[in-house]
Amino acid sequence: MLKDVKPQIRIGVVGCGNISQAYLHNAAMFPAIRPVACADLNLSVAKARADAFGIKALDYDEMLASSEIDLILNLTVPTAHFDVSMRALQAGKHVFTEKPLSATFEEGRRLVDEARARDLLIGSAPDTFLGAAGRYARQQIETGMIGRVVAGTAFMMGRGMEHWHPDPTFYYQPGGGPVLDMGPYYLTMMVNLLGPIRRVQAMATSAYAERLVSAEGPLKGKSIPVNTPTTVAALLEFDKGAQITFVASWDIYRHSGRQIELHGTEGSLGLPDPDNFSGVVSLSRLGAPWQDVDTADMSFGALNWPLDAPDRGNYRMLGLADMAQALVEGRRPRASGDLALHVLDVMQAILSAGETGEAVTIDPVDCQPAILDEDEAEGLLV
């Protein structure tokens, strides 16, 4: 693995949609990585993105054949993740992909196995757990501030996609829904904090048979069918014994629950939205009033997005920067393929349990990321 490592990991970006802007903009923060080319099915889109960031526009075959590219950053649509990532691995490139790792657990396992067989690294978003809030929360748990975690809640609740997305049809079909769309952020954060999940139970329903699209676009004012659960309540049992209630719903107008709250034998911990890299983490020791810690002053905690009026921390590319360091150190990246595969396994188990009413046991796996302390986090910037 180490013999071909360059001083900088040279990246080819595949998929030049909106999210590519954040990745390419943030790349300049990390000296160990350097985007050199981008590709898209729409060549004009690739050319525009290449011009904006001073890189080359290539087609994917050219990218795979290039000796000047070490790693493929896969930002394509989820249904294309497997093919794009597998071709990259077979061409001898490391891979970092947007969530999910693949559309199915079986495909994801093939990718992880292929990378391992070829002595390559594969990693996947979300990497938000490496942000300031996730790191601070992990530190509190590891140092015993709330004791052994016994129970907790995780709530992903909202009104769905039809209020802002011009064509939300996909989100309400099999392969969509709140568990698969937003679940990776919540489940990845919880596995980071608590370790792997060993069993799930769930119930699932849909509040509406159709959704009325109100977002501007060609479907505004039209109804789309709902063919996947839009409210799922799951009970997650972790290897270390914690039992967490996880609710993912697009049928909720308003709620007051904290996104993630963990309760241990010596206290409680509250986390902000795991879709973001920062925010306020709250701690209560032995029933004392909540103490709020704003993580904005920590590495990868400052509000930086959107660029014109920042209201959140967005450090997408952080997981890939850690992967570049992992290549140098000969270790597993924190946002690893093993972690993403476990989360994919859990999400499919939740949906299966919701459909059958039966508990699903998860295959045991060692996937909890290594702690990223403040010094190591700052080290990624130099």
Image (cartoon, rainbow, N blue to C red):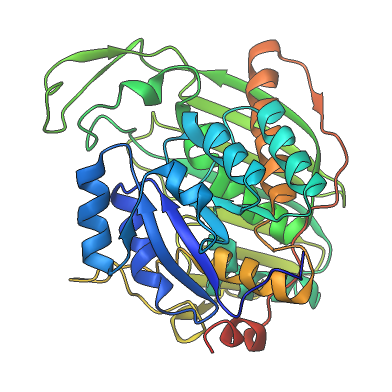
Q: Quadrant of residue 214?
A: top left
Residue 273 visible: yes
Depicted 262 relative to depicted 347: above or below = below
Depicted 243 relative to depicted 249: above or below = below
Work out whether residue 59 or residue 185 is closer to the camera in this orientation and state it: 59
| Residue 185 place in picture, x, y as percent | 54, 50
Residue 285 visible: no
Answer with left or right where residue 103 lies relative to residue 24. right
Answer with left or right where residue 38 lies relative to residue 187. left
The N terminus, quarter of image: bottom right
| Residue 121 place in picture, x, y as percent | 70, 56
Q: Residue at x 42, y 54 (%)?
A: 13
Answer with left or right where residue 117 lies relative to residue 33. right
Q: Residue at x 35, y 75 (%)?
A: 303
Depicted 361 relative to depicted 29: above or below = above
Q: Quadrant of residue 345?
A: top right
Q: Quadrant of residue 107?
A: top right
Q: How many marks?
A: 0
| Residue 68 place in picture, x, y as percent | 51, 64
Work out whether residue 279 or residue 128 is closer to the camera in this orientation and state it: 128
The C terminus, quarter of image: bottom right
Depicted 132 relative to depicted 109: above or below = below
Work out whether residue 317 or residue 257 is closer to the camera in this orientation and state it: 317
| Residue 192 place in picture, x, y as percent | 70, 59
Q: Residue at x 39, y 21 (%)?
A: 172
Q: Residue at x 11, y 19 (%)?
A: 221
Answer with left or right where residue 23 lies relative to residue 203. left
Work out whether residue 154 or residue 255 is closer to the camera in this orientation and state it: 154
